[in-house]
Image (cartoon, helix red, strand yellow):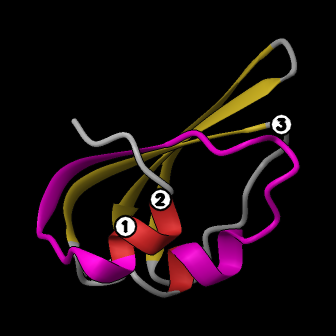
Amino acid sequence: VVVADGPNWLVANRGPWDLVLLDPPYAFDGWPALLGGPLVGSVAGVVVVESDREVDPGPSWNVGSTRRHGSTVVTLLTPTD
């Protein structure tokens, strides 16, 4: 388990990873850069995204499921390849 600034850590440490949990502050608006950049090609399993809204992961990801729990939205992503 690594507790760190996700985008910076992901750029410095390439995978492959089986499970990535992303739970940034709800005001985070860098999803396109994060999901379109350092995670592409580095995930061999699942990315779990927690946000206050649905996240468009872009073309590199399949959305496995999206669930709303109160004001929280949890989305499961897998790589398209």
Indicate the amino acid at tag 2.
Gly
Q: How many C-alpha atoms fall within 10 Å of the one at disc 2: few (<14), some, or many (≥20)?
A: some
| Image vertical order of residue 81 relative to residue 29, above or below | below
Q: Which tag, 3 or 1, sits closer to the chain's start?
A: 1
Apparent side of residue 58 relative to residue 15 in the rendered image (left or right): right
Residue under label 3, please give it: 52
Residue 45 quadrant? bottom left
Q: Are marks 3 and 2 in contact (CB under 8 Å)?
A: no
Which residue shows up at 82% across the image and 41% down it? 26
Which residue shows up at 27% across the image and 42% down it? 2
- Circle on res. 6: 2
Spatial CA span between label 1 and label 2: 5 Å
Is residue 15 one of those drawn in magenta? yes
Indicate the amino acid at tag 1.
Trp
**x and y percent of residue 57 in the render?**
61, 69
Query: Relative to the observer, which residue lies in front, 27 or 59?
Result: 27
Which residue shows up at 75% across the image and 42% down it? 25
Give SS at disc 2: helix
